[in-house]
Amino acid sequence: MEKPLIEVLDTHGEILEEIKAIIQEEIPAAEPGARSRGIKTKFESCAEAVLETLERFEAERKAEAGGVLPEDLARKIASPEDFPRLTIVYLPNPYDARLFAERFINSLFQARKRQIKGPRVLIVLDEAQEFIPDRQRSDDYTLQSNIAVEQLLRQGRKYRLHCWISTQRVAHLNVNAVQQLHSYFAGTLPRSYDRHVIADAAGVSPEILDKTALLDIGEWLFISYKATRIRGVPVFIKAPDNEKILLEQLIQGPPSA
């Protein structure tokens, strides 16, 4: 008697990647004329549904081995009770990270659309160029993560969902997503194109951004109409060295009673 398909896939996880590779290879060959017109063929729709099912099964299989599903994490964080104060997700594989982010953000929106009540949620995306790059493809999930993160930046605030992005590769970001930000902390930007992207997104003079090339460690150019109530006028600030403060406290020890 043959084993059920799920059991076979669970025993031989590499089959998932082989099936996904075959489907992704066949999709571009399906009626290229229709693709150029932006029309999704029946084959593409079916293939994408199969891919989504395989990806979900793969995530569930990994969760059984000690991981966590993005949908479960989203429901827990969006809950008005017993929500975790801090959750750190580390996924070194960019493909896994983008897929997790897309499913997590979409699940958060679904939960909040049913019930807006709950804690404010702040999502911090480090190495943001991996999630919202300017060049997007569906086969590496950059398209899916771009759509999810841009939705978060555009609509998240009315659902008490907020986002910070952090990157050293400003030139590789999706400009449409960057323009949704309300505040910018610009550190040293030696490349002129990076400075131009921030100046255009924040609506400030490029000459002011040029001064960021001379910033020292801990010095930032802060741009925020919401915080300063001054449109188009950035402020140069200097942040304290937290590592130095911690070291001094460790050397001195706790204060005596």
Image (spheres, rainbow, N blue to C red):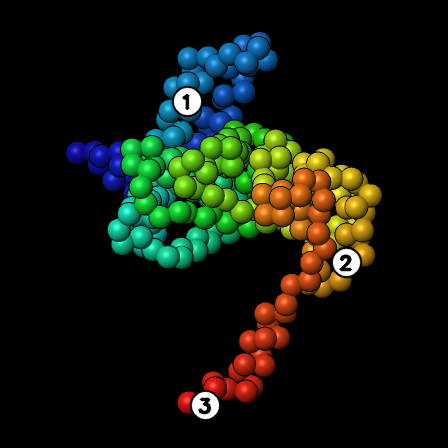
Q: Name which residue lies at 57% across and 10% down.
A: 37
Location of residue 141 with respect to 124 vertically, above or below: above
Distance of label 3 from label 1 (alpha carbons): 67 Å
Residue at numbered disc 3: 256
Percent position (x, y) of residue 73? Answer: 34, 47
Residue at numbered disc 2: 215
Secondary element type, mark 1: helix
What kind of residue is marked 1? Ala
Q: Which residue lies furthest to the front in this view?
A: 229
Percent position (x, y) of residue 101? Answer: 45, 41
What kind of residue is marked 3? Ser
Secondary element type, mark 3: loop
Q: Which of marks 3 and 1 is in front?
A: 3
Task: State if disc 1 and disc 3 touch (CB < 8 Å).
Answer: no
Task: State if disc 2 and disc 1 touch (CB < 8 Å).
Answer: no
169 vs 122, left or right, is: right
Q: Name which residue lies at 34% across and 52% down.
A: 67
192 vs 247, left or right, is: right
Looking at marks 1 and 2 on the same chain, the residue that comes earlier in the sequence is marked by 1
Q: Nearer the viewer, residue 55 or 125?
A: 125
Residue at numbered disc 1: 47
128 vs 113, left or right, is: right
What kind of residue is marked 2? Leu
